Protein backbone atom coordinates (compact mmCIF):
# COMPACT_ATOMS: atom_id res chain seq x y z
CA UNK A 1 0.00 0.00 0.00
CA UNK A 2 1.31 3.46 -0.95
CA UNK A 3 2.34 5.66 1.96
CA UNK A 4 0.41 8.96 2.29
CA UNK A 5 2.26 12.07 1.17
CA UNK A 6 0.88 14.03 4.14
CA UNK A 7 -0.96 12.95 7.27
CA UNK A 8 -2.37 15.44 9.76
CA UNK A 9 -4.00 14.09 12.92
CA UNK A 10 -5.90 15.97 15.63
CA UNK A 11 -4.68 19.42 14.56
CA UNK A 12 -5.75 22.21 16.91
CA UNK A 13 -4.89 25.90 16.66
CA UNK A 14 -6.04 28.89 18.67
CA UNK A 15 -5.43 32.61 18.07
CA UNK A 16 -6.31 34.40 21.28
CA UNK A 17 -9.92 33.52 22.05
CA UNK A 18 -10.55 32.21 18.51
CA UNK A 19 -10.34 28.45 17.97
CA UNK A 20 -9.25 28.30 14.34
CA UNK A 21 -8.90 24.50 14.12
CA UNK A 22 -10.59 21.92 16.34
CA UNK A 23 -9.00 18.48 16.02
CA UNK A 24 -8.68 18.32 12.22
CA UNK A 25 -7.60 15.11 10.47
CA UNK A 26 -6.41 15.20 6.86
CA UNK A 27 -4.65 12.74 4.53
CA UNK A 28 -3.16 13.50 1.10
CA UNK A 29 -2.58 10.48 -1.12
CA UNK A 30 -0.10 10.29 -4.03
CA UNK A 31 -1.77 10.73 -7.41
CA UNK A 32 -4.93 12.28 -5.97
CA UNK A 33 -6.18 15.85 -5.69
CA UNK A 34 -8.15 16.74 -2.57
CA UNK A 35 -10.35 19.82 -2.83
CA UNK A 36 -10.59 21.67 0.49
CA UNK A 37 -13.59 23.99 0.70
CA UNK A 38 -15.29 26.03 3.40
CA UNK A 39 -16.47 29.52 4.22
CA UNK A 40 -14.08 32.39 4.89
CA UNK A 41 -12.73 31.96 8.41
CA UNK A 42 -13.40 28.21 8.43
CA UNK A 43 -9.67 27.53 8.98
CA UNK A 44 -8.46 26.54 5.49
CA UNK A 45 -5.52 28.94 5.27
CA UNK A 46 -4.56 28.21 8.89
CA UNK A 47 -4.43 24.50 8.08
CA UNK A 48 -2.26 25.19 5.01
CA UNK A 49 0.09 27.33 7.11
CA UNK A 50 0.46 24.49 9.63
CA UNK A 51 1.07 21.88 6.92
CA UNK A 52 3.66 24.24 5.39
CA UNK A 53 5.47 24.71 8.71
CA UNK A 54 4.65 28.41 9.11
CA UNK A 55 2.53 27.88 12.25
CA UNK A 56 3.09 25.15 14.82
CA UNK A 57 -0.10 23.34 15.88
CA UNK A 58 -1.21 23.71 19.49
CA UNK A 59 -2.01 19.99 19.47
CA UNK A 60 -1.83 17.12 16.99
CA UNK A 61 0.90 16.19 14.56
CA UNK A 62 1.82 16.42 10.87
CA UNK A 63 3.75 13.64 9.11
CA UNK A 64 5.31 14.31 5.70
CA UNK A 65 6.23 11.56 3.24
CA UNK A 66 8.50 13.82 1.18
CA UNK A 67 9.16 17.42 0.05
CA UNK A 68 6.16 19.75 0.14
CA UNK A 69 5.65 23.08 -1.68
CA UNK A 70 2.92 25.69 -1.22
CA UNK A 71 1.41 28.42 -3.37
CA UNK A 72 -0.28 30.76 -0.92
CA UNK A 73 -3.43 32.82 -1.46
CA UNK A 74 -1.52 36.07 -0.92
CA UNK A 75 1.62 36.77 -2.91
CA UNK A 76 4.86 35.57 -1.33
CA UNK A 77 7.23 36.72 -4.06
CA UNK A 78 10.14 38.99 -3.11
CA UNK A 79 9.42 42.26 -4.98
CA UNK A 80 13.05 43.35 -5.22
CA UNK A 81 14.18 40.13 -6.93
CA UNK A 82 13.67 39.14 -10.54
CA UNK A 83 11.28 36.42 -11.70
CA UNK A 84 14.18 33.98 -12.16
CA UNK A 85 15.60 34.77 -8.71
CA UNK A 86 12.16 34.12 -7.15
CA UNK A 87 11.60 30.87 -9.06
CA UNK A 88 14.97 29.48 -7.84
CA UNK A 89 15.01 31.18 -4.45
CA UNK A 90 17.13 29.10 -2.07
CA UNK A 91 18.18 26.56 -4.72
CA UNK A 92 20.09 28.56 -7.31
CA UNK A 93 22.10 26.53 -9.88
CA UNK A 94 25.83 26.71 -9.19
CA UNK A 95 29.05 26.67 -11.17
CA UNK A 96 31.75 24.49 -9.62
CA UNK A 97 29.50 24.23 -6.59
CA UNK A 98 30.32 27.78 -5.46
CA UNK A 99 29.19 30.56 -7.79
CA UNK A 100 25.58 31.21 -8.75
CA UNK A 101 25.08 30.45 -12.43
CA UNK A 102 22.86 33.39 -13.31
CA UNK A 103 22.71 32.55 -17.00
CA UNK A 104 21.59 28.98 -16.33
CA UNK A 105 19.02 30.18 -13.79
CA UNK A 106 17.47 32.53 -16.36
CA UNK A 107 17.58 29.80 -19.02
CA UNK A 108 15.80 27.29 -16.80
CA UNK A 109 13.18 29.87 -15.82
CA UNK A 110 12.47 30.71 -19.46
CA UNK A 111 12.21 26.99 -20.22
CA UNK A 112 9.71 26.37 -17.40
CA UNK A 113 7.65 29.38 -18.47
CA UNK A 114 7.66 28.14 -22.08
CA UNK A 115 6.59 24.64 -20.99
CA UNK A 116 3.61 26.23 -19.23
CA UNK A 117 2.76 28.59 -22.05
CA UNK A 118 3.20 31.65 -19.82
CA UNK A 119 4.74 34.88 -21.09
CA UNK A 120 6.56 36.31 -18.08
CA UNK A 121 10.00 37.87 -18.51
CA UNK A 122 12.58 35.99 -16.44
CA UNK A 123 14.56 39.21 -15.94
CA UNK A 124 11.61 41.35 -14.80
CA UNK A 125 11.63 42.54 -11.16
CA UNK A 126 8.67 41.01 -9.37
CA UNK A 127 7.70 44.38 -7.95
CA UNK A 128 6.69 45.44 -11.47
CA UNK A 129 4.49 42.40 -12.19
CA UNK A 130 0.71 42.29 -12.35
CA UNK A 131 -1.27 40.26 -9.82
CA UNK A 132 -1.59 37.44 -12.37
CA UNK A 133 2.12 37.43 -13.20
CA UNK A 134 3.06 37.21 -9.50
CA UNK A 135 0.70 34.26 -9.12
CA UNK A 136 2.24 32.56 -12.16
CA UNK A 137 5.72 33.10 -10.71
CA UNK A 138 4.71 31.42 -7.45
CA UNK A 139 3.12 28.46 -9.20
CA UNK A 140 6.20 27.96 -11.37
CA UNK A 141 8.48 28.27 -8.31
CA UNK A 142 6.58 25.48 -6.55
CA UNK A 143 6.46 23.16 -9.54
CA UNK A 144 10.04 23.77 -10.70
CA UNK A 145 11.24 22.39 -7.36
CA UNK A 146 10.03 18.90 -8.31
CA UNK A 147 7.84 18.57 -5.22
CA UNK A 148 5.96 15.33 -4.43
CA UNK A 149 3.21 17.18 -2.57
CA UNK A 150 1.73 20.51 -3.68
CA UNK A 151 -0.60 22.75 -1.69
CA UNK A 152 -2.51 25.29 -3.82
CA UNK A 153 -4.39 28.00 -1.89
CA UNK A 154 -6.76 29.77 -4.34
CA UNK A 155 -4.30 29.34 -7.25
CA UNK A 156 -6.66 30.63 -9.95
CA UNK A 157 -7.79 33.79 -8.16
CA UNK A 158 -5.72 36.05 -10.42
CA UNK A 159 -5.59 33.94 -13.59
CA UNK A 160 -7.55 34.44 -16.79
CA UNK A 161 -9.38 31.56 -18.41
CA UNK A 162 -6.54 30.37 -20.67
CA UNK A 163 -4.06 30.35 -17.78
CA UNK A 164 -6.55 28.39 -15.63
CA UNK A 165 -6.89 25.76 -18.34
CA UNK A 166 -3.09 25.45 -18.57
CA UNK A 167 -2.87 25.10 -14.78
CA UNK A 168 -5.52 22.36 -14.76
CA UNK A 169 -3.69 20.45 -17.49
CA UNK A 170 -0.48 20.63 -15.44
CA UNK A 171 -2.34 19.43 -12.33
CA UNK A 172 -3.64 16.43 -14.28
CA UNK A 173 -0.08 15.64 -15.38
CA UNK A 174 1.16 15.91 -11.80
CA UNK A 175 -1.55 13.54 -10.59
CA UNK A 176 -0.50 11.02 -13.24
CA UNK A 177 3.09 11.35 -12.00
CA UNK A 178 2.02 10.48 -8.45
CA UNK A 179 2.10 13.96 -6.92
CA UNK A 180 -0.35 14.57 -4.06
CA UNK A 181 -2.27 17.84 -4.35
CA UNK A 182 -4.34 19.86 -1.91
CA UNK A 183 -6.51 22.31 -3.85
CA UNK A 184 -8.29 25.13 -2.01
CA UNK A 185 -10.89 27.09 -3.95
CA UNK A 186 -14.13 29.00 -3.47
CA UNK A 187 -15.11 28.03 -7.02
CA UNK A 188 -16.94 24.75 -6.61
CA UNK A 189 -17.01 24.19 -10.38
CA UNK A 190 -13.18 24.08 -10.27
CA UNK A 191 -13.27 21.49 -7.49
CA UNK A 192 -15.60 19.27 -9.53
CA UNK A 193 -13.42 19.68 -12.63
CA UNK A 194 -9.98 18.95 -11.22
CA UNK A 195 -10.27 17.13 -7.87
CA UNK A 196 -10.71 13.45 -7.07
CA UNK A 197 -11.82 13.93 -3.44
CA UNK A 198 -13.31 16.74 -1.36
CA UNK A 199 -13.15 17.83 2.29
CA UNK A 200 -15.24 20.53 3.99
CA UNK A 201 -14.09 22.67 6.91
CA UNK A 202 -16.72 24.53 8.93
CA UNK A 203 -15.87 26.61 11.99
CA UNK A 204 -12.52 24.86 12.35
CA UNK A 205 -13.92 21.32 12.15
CA UNK A 206 -13.78 18.79 9.32
CA UNK A 207 -17.47 18.06 8.68
CA UNK A 208 -17.21 16.08 5.43
CA UNK A 209 -14.60 14.00 3.59
CA UNK A 210 -15.62 11.98 0.54
CA UNK A 211 -14.71 10.95 -3.00
CA UNK A 212 -16.01 13.65 -5.32
CA UNK A 213 -18.44 11.41 -7.27
CA UNK A 214 -20.27 10.75 -4.01
CA UNK A 215 -21.30 14.39 -3.41
CA UNK A 216 -23.26 17.08 -5.25
CA UNK A 217 -22.76 20.83 -5.38
CA UNK A 218 -25.85 21.35 -3.22
CA UNK A 219 -24.62 18.92 -0.56
CA UNK A 220 -21.24 20.69 -0.50
CA UNK A 221 -22.85 24.10 -0.02
CA UNK A 222 -25.03 22.71 2.77
CA UNK A 223 -21.96 21.22 4.49
CA UNK A 224 -20.10 24.53 4.15
CA UNK A 225 -22.78 26.85 5.52
CA UNK A 226 -25.05 24.50 7.48
CA UNK A 227 -28.52 23.31 6.59
CA UNK A 228 -30.20 26.34 8.19
CA UNK A 229 -28.12 28.94 6.31
CA UNK A 230 -28.22 28.66 2.54
CA UNK A 231 -26.88 31.63 0.54
CA UNK A 232 -29.44 33.84 -1.15
CA UNK A 233 -29.12 35.03 -4.72
CA UNK A 234 -28.75 38.78 -5.31
CA UNK A 235 -31.89 40.62 -6.34
CA UNK A 236 -32.50 40.91 -10.08
CA UNK A 237 -30.98 44.04 -11.53
CA UNK A 238 -33.72 44.30 -14.14
CA UNK A 239 -36.69 43.98 -11.82
CA UNK A 240 -35.39 46.22 -9.04
CA UNK A 241 -36.80 49.75 -8.89
CA UNK A 242 -34.16 52.36 -8.08
CA UNK A 243 -34.13 56.11 -7.51
CA UNK A 244 -33.67 58.01 -10.74
CA UNK A 245 -31.22 60.83 -11.30
CA UNK A 246 -27.68 61.13 -10.03
CA UNK A 247 -24.62 62.16 -11.98
CA UNK A 248 -23.55 60.61 -15.25
CA UNK A 249 -20.06 59.14 -15.57
CA UNK A 250 -18.50 60.02 -18.92
CA UNK A 251 -15.30 58.35 -20.12
CA UNK A 252 -14.09 60.22 -23.20
CA UNK A 253 -11.37 58.88 -25.49
CA UNK A 254 -9.24 57.28 -22.77
CA UNK A 255 -5.98 55.71 -23.87
CA UNK A 256 -3.38 53.93 -21.78
CA UNK A 257 -0.39 51.74 -22.54
CA UNK A 258 1.46 49.52 -20.08
CA UNK A 259 3.13 46.08 -20.30
CA UNK A 260 0.44 43.57 -21.27
CA UNK A 261 -2.44 46.07 -21.40
CA UNK A 262 -3.53 48.80 -23.80
CA UNK A 263 -6.63 51.02 -23.96
CA UNK A 264 -7.34 52.50 -27.39
CA UNK A 265 -9.52 55.60 -27.17
CA UNK A 266 -12.28 54.07 -25.03
CA UNK A 267 -15.46 56.13 -24.57
CA UNK A 268 -18.25 55.03 -22.25
CA UNK A 269 -21.20 56.62 -20.43
CA UNK A 270 -22.76 55.31 -17.21
CA UNK A 271 -26.00 57.10 -16.48
CA UNK A 272 -26.82 58.24 -12.98
CA UNK A 273 -28.11 55.24 -11.03
CA UNK A 274 -27.11 52.74 -13.72
CA UNK A 275 -25.05 49.61 -12.98
CA UNK A 276 -22.63 48.73 -15.78
CA UNK A 277 -20.38 45.68 -15.87
CA UNK A 278 -17.16 45.66 -17.87
CA UNK A 279 -15.43 42.39 -18.57
CA UNK A 280 -12.82 40.73 -20.74
CA UNK A 281 -9.80 38.49 -20.58
CA UNK A 282 -6.72 39.55 -18.65
CA UNK A 283 -5.03 42.30 -20.62
CA UNK A 284 -8.28 43.36 -22.30
CA UNK A 285 -8.16 46.68 -20.46
CA UNK A 286 -11.32 46.21 -18.36
CA UNK A 287 -9.50 46.44 -15.02
CA UNK A 288 -7.24 49.24 -16.26
CA UNK A 289 -10.29 51.27 -17.31
CA UNK A 290 -11.86 50.84 -13.87
CA UNK A 291 -8.61 51.91 -12.17
CA UNK A 292 -8.51 55.05 -14.31
CA UNK A 293 -12.12 55.95 -13.47
CA UNK A 294 -11.38 55.45 -9.76
CA UNK A 295 -8.37 57.78 -9.92
CA UNK A 296 -5.97 54.95 -9.06
CA UNK A 297 -4.23 55.19 -12.44
CA UNK A 298 -3.62 58.08 -14.81
CA UNK A 299 -4.54 57.69 -18.51
CA UNK A 300 -2.10 58.64 -21.23
CA UNK A 301 -4.83 60.77 -22.79
CA UNK A 302 -8.58 61.32 -22.61
CA UNK A 303 -10.82 62.52 -19.81
CA UNK A 304 -13.11 61.17 -17.10
CA UNK A 305 -16.04 63.29 -15.88
CA UNK A 306 -18.56 62.73 -13.11
CA UNK A 307 -21.46 65.08 -13.75
CA UNK A 308 -20.01 68.45 -14.71
CA UNK A 309 -16.75 67.76 -12.88
CA UNK A 310 -13.63 66.67 -14.76
CA UNK A 311 -11.63 64.31 -12.56
CA UNK A 312 -7.95 64.91 -11.98
CA UNK A 313 -6.03 62.06 -13.69
CA UNK A 314 -4.49 59.52 -11.33
CA UNK A 315 -5.60 61.32 -8.15
CA UNK A 316 -7.43 58.85 -5.91
CA UNK A 317 -7.97 61.44 -3.16
CA UNK A 318 -9.64 63.83 -5.62
CA UNK A 319 -11.83 61.02 -6.92
CA UNK A 320 -12.90 60.19 -3.36
CA UNK A 321 -13.82 63.83 -2.74
CA UNK A 322 -15.80 63.81 -5.98
CA UNK A 323 -17.87 60.93 -4.62
CA UNK A 324 -16.24 57.81 -6.08
CA UNK A 325 -15.98 54.76 -3.83
CA UNK A 326 -13.37 52.19 -4.84
CA UNK A 327 -13.04 48.43 -4.33
CA UNK A 328 -9.56 47.61 -5.73
CA UNK A 329 -8.44 44.38 -7.36
CA UNK A 330 -5.62 43.70 -4.87
CA UNK A 331 -6.96 44.15 -1.35
CA UNK A 332 -3.58 43.35 0.20
CA UNK A 333 -1.87 46.23 -1.61
CA UNK A 334 -4.68 48.78 -1.91
CA UNK A 335 -7.73 47.72 0.09
CA UNK A 336 -6.84 48.30 3.74
CA UNK A 337 -4.14 49.23 6.24
CA UNK A 338 -3.14 45.88 7.84
CA UNK A 339 -2.14 47.17 11.29
CA UNK A 340 -5.30 49.24 11.79
CA UNK A 341 -8.56 47.83 13.08
CA UNK A 342 -11.66 47.10 11.02
CA UNK A 343 -13.46 50.24 12.23
CA UNK A 344 -10.47 52.48 11.45
CA UNK A 345 -10.24 51.05 7.95
CA UNK A 346 -13.95 51.26 7.20
CA UNK A 347 -14.25 54.86 8.45
CA UNK A 348 -11.08 55.98 6.66
CA UNK A 349 -12.85 57.07 3.47
CA UNK A 350 -15.42 59.28 5.21
CA UNK A 351 -14.51 62.80 4.12
CA UNK A 352 -14.44 65.86 6.35
CA UNK A 353 -17.58 67.15 4.64
CA UNK A 354 -19.52 64.05 5.61
CA UNK A 355 -18.06 63.99 9.12
CA UNK A 356 -18.63 67.68 9.88
CA UNK A 357 -21.54 67.03 12.27
CA UNK A 358 -19.51 64.56 14.34
CA UNK A 359 -16.00 66.02 14.24
CA UNK A 360 -14.68 67.67 17.35
CA UNK A 361 -12.88 70.98 17.40
CA UNK A 362 -9.57 69.24 16.93
CA UNK A 363 -10.81 67.85 13.62
CA UNK A 364 -10.69 64.12 14.43
CA UNK A 365 -13.20 61.41 15.15
CA UNK A 366 -13.02 59.47 18.40
CA UNK A 367 -12.87 55.65 18.65
CA UNK A 368 -16.46 55.32 19.91
CA UNK A 369 -17.91 57.41 17.12
CA UNK A 370 -15.73 55.63 14.58
CA UNK A 371 -16.99 52.23 15.70
CA UNK A 372 -20.57 53.52 15.70
CA UNK A 373 -20.13 54.59 12.07
CA UNK A 374 -18.50 51.30 11.04
CA UNK A 375 -20.75 48.90 12.97
CA UNK A 376 -23.82 49.01 10.65
CA UNK A 377 -21.69 48.19 7.61
CA UNK A 378 -19.84 45.45 9.49
CA UNK A 379 -23.18 43.95 10.51
CA UNK A 380 -24.65 44.08 7.00
CA UNK A 381 -21.51 42.45 5.59
CA UNK A 382 -21.46 39.79 8.36
CA UNK A 383 -17.89 40.66 9.29
CA UNK A 384 -16.39 37.95 11.50
CA UNK A 385 -13.84 39.36 13.95
CA UNK A 386 -13.09 39.49 17.66
CA UNK A 387 -14.17 43.14 17.57
CA UNK A 388 -13.99 46.16 15.29
CA UNK A 389 -10.63 47.05 16.81
CA UNK A 390 -8.98 43.80 15.68
CA UNK A 391 -6.16 44.49 13.18
CA UNK A 392 -7.34 43.62 9.68
CA UNK A 393 -4.17 41.61 8.98
CA UNK A 394 -5.43 39.04 11.52
CA UNK A 395 -8.71 38.46 9.64
CA UNK A 396 -9.32 35.79 7.03
CA UNK A 397 -9.04 36.78 3.38
CA UNK A 398 -12.82 36.92 2.94
CA UNK A 399 -13.28 39.14 5.96
CA UNK A 400 -10.49 41.40 4.73
CA UNK A 401 -12.50 41.73 1.52
CA UNK A 402 -15.58 42.68 3.54
CA UNK A 403 -13.58 45.45 5.21
CA UNK A 404 -12.43 46.62 1.78
CA UNK A 405 -16.01 46.75 0.51
CA UNK A 406 -17.19 48.48 3.69
CA UNK A 407 -14.47 51.09 3.29
CA UNK A 408 -15.70 51.85 -0.24
CA UNK A 409 -19.34 52.18 0.84
CA UNK A 410 -18.80 54.15 4.06
CA UNK A 411 -18.56 57.53 2.30
CA UNK A 412 -22.01 57.18 0.64
CA UNK A 413 -20.47 57.39 -2.84
CA UNK A 414 -22.26 58.71 -5.92
CA UNK A 415 -20.35 56.16 -8.02
CA UNK A 416 -18.92 52.82 -6.90
CA UNK A 417 -16.02 51.40 -8.90
CA UNK A 418 -15.63 47.73 -8.01
CA UNK A 419 -12.93 45.43 -9.41
CA UNK A 420 -13.54 41.69 -8.89
CA UNK A 421 -15.36 42.42 -5.59
CA UNK A 422 -15.98 38.76 -4.73
CA UNK A 423 -12.50 37.36 -5.45
CA UNK A 424 -11.33 34.98 -2.74
CA UNK A 425 -14.62 34.75 -0.86
CA UNK A 426 -16.86 31.77 -0.20
CA UNK A 427 -20.19 31.08 -1.89
CA UNK A 428 -22.30 32.62 0.90
CA UNK A 429 -20.10 35.73 1.23
CA UNK A 430 -20.14 36.18 -2.55
CA UNK A 431 -23.93 36.41 -2.55
CA UNK A 432 -23.79 38.70 0.49
CA UNK A 433 -21.30 41.16 -1.06
CA UNK A 434 -23.13 41.30 -4.39
CA UNK A 435 -26.40 41.68 -2.50
CA UNK A 436 -25.01 44.66 -0.57
CA UNK A 437 -23.81 46.37 -3.75
CA UNK A 438 -27.23 45.69 -5.26
CA UNK A 439 -29.02 47.07 -2.19
CA UNK A 440 -26.90 50.22 -1.92
CA UNK A 441 -27.29 51.14 -5.58
CA UNK A 442 -31.04 50.43 -5.55
CA UNK A 443 -31.74 52.42 -2.39
CA UNK A 444 -29.40 55.38 -2.90
CA UNK A 445 -29.38 55.71 -6.69
CA UNK A 446 -25.58 55.45 -6.79
CA UNK A 447 -24.07 54.30 -10.06
CA UNK A 448 -21.89 51.20 -10.30
CA UNK A 449 -18.99 50.36 -12.61
CA UNK A 450 -18.14 46.72 -11.93
CA UNK A 451 -15.07 45.25 -13.64
CA UNK A 452 -14.72 41.49 -13.35
CA UNK A 453 -13.76 38.42 -15.34
CA UNK A 454 -15.98 36.36 -13.02
CA UNK A 455 -19.26 36.39 -14.94
CA UNK A 456 -21.34 35.60 -11.85
CA UNK A 457 -20.35 39.03 -10.46
CA UNK A 458 -22.19 40.72 -13.33
CA UNK A 459 -25.69 39.50 -12.45
CA UNK A 460 -26.51 42.74 -10.61
CA UNK A 461 -25.65 44.92 -13.63
CA UNK A 462 -28.11 46.53 -16.06
CA UNK A 463 -25.80 46.02 -19.03
CA UNK A 464 -22.42 44.44 -19.70
CA UNK A 465 -19.66 45.89 -21.87
CA UNK A 466 -16.98 43.55 -23.24
CA UNK A 467 -13.45 44.81 -23.96
CA UNK A 468 -11.09 43.02 -26.32
CA UNK A 469 -7.52 44.26 -26.89
CA UNK A 470 -8.29 47.62 -25.29
CA UNK A 471 -11.42 48.40 -27.30
CA UNK A 472 -15.15 48.00 -26.68
CA UNK A 473 -16.07 44.87 -28.64
CA UNK A 474 -19.67 44.12 -27.65
CA UNK A 475 -22.48 45.09 -25.28
CA UNK A 476 -25.13 42.89 -23.71
CA UNK A 477 -28.20 43.44 -21.54
CA UNK A 478 -28.07 41.71 -18.18
CA UNK A 479 -28.67 38.87 -17.61
CA UNK A 480 -26.79 37.93 -20.78
CA UNK A 481 -26.49 34.67 -22.67
CA UNK A 482 -23.48 33.13 -20.95
CA UNK A 483 -22.09 31.36 -24.01
CA UNK A 484 -22.39 34.50 -26.14
CA UNK A 485 -20.70 36.54 -23.41
CA UNK A 486 -17.79 34.12 -23.13
CA UNK A 487 -17.44 34.06 -26.92
CA UNK A 488 -17.33 37.88 -26.97
CA UNK A 489 -14.52 37.97 -24.41
CA UNK A 490 -12.54 35.76 -26.79
CA UNK A 491 -13.19 38.25 -29.61
CA UNK A 492 -15.79 36.04 -31.35
CA UNK A 493 -18.71 38.05 -32.68
Image: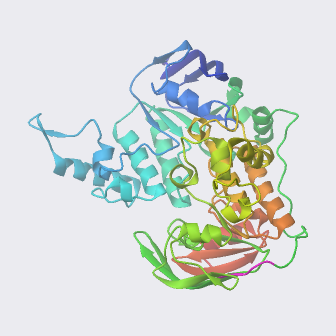
- Which residue lies most toward the front here? 361
Instruction: Count every numbered label the image shows and give the total.
Output: 0
Residue 461 quadrant: bottom right
Which residues fall within the magenta stretch? 246-250
Which of 447 and 33 lies nearest the eye of the viewer? 447
Side of 443 relative to 102 (left or right): right
Above-or-below relation of 114 to 10: below
Residue 86 quadrant: top left
Q: Position of residue 96 (x, y in %)?
A: 8, 36
Write the residue at 36% across / 53% down: 126
Write the residue at 53% across / 67% down: 296
Q: Position of residue 128 (x, y in %)?
A: 37, 59
Q: Position of residue 449 (x, y in %)?
A: 68, 70
Which quadrant holds the C terminus?
Answer: bottom right
Side of 155 relative to 483 (left or right): left
Taking the magenta stretch, the answer to whether it contains residue 391 is no
Q: How is the image coloured?
A: rainbow
Question: Is residue 279 visible to us here?
Answer: no
Above-or-below relation of 104 to 210: below
Residue 67 quadrant: top left
Which of 196 and 399 lies nearest the eye of the viewer? 399
Which of 207 and 387 lies nearest the eye of the viewer? 387
Question: Is residue 42 visible to us here?
Answer: yes
The secondary structure that most of the magenta stretch takes on is loop
Write the residue at 32% across / 52% down: 83
Q: Position of residue 48 (x, y in %)?
A: 53, 30
Write the residue at 86% across / 59% down: 235
Taking the magenta stretch, the answer to whether it contains residue 247 is yes
Amino acid sequence: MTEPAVEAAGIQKRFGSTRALRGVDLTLEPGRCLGLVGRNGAGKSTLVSILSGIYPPDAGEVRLGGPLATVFQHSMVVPGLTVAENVFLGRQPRRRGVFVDWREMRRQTRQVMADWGFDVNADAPCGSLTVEQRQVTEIVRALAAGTRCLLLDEPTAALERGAVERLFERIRQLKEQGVAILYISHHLEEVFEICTDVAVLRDGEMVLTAPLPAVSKDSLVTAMVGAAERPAEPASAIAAARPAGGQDLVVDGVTHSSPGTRLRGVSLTVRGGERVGITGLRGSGAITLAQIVAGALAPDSGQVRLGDRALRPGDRSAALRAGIGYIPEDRQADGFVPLLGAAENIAMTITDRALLPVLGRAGFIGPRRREALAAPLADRLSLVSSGLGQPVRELSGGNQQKVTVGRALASDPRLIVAITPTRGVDVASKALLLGELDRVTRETGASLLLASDELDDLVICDRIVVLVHGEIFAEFPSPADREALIAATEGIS
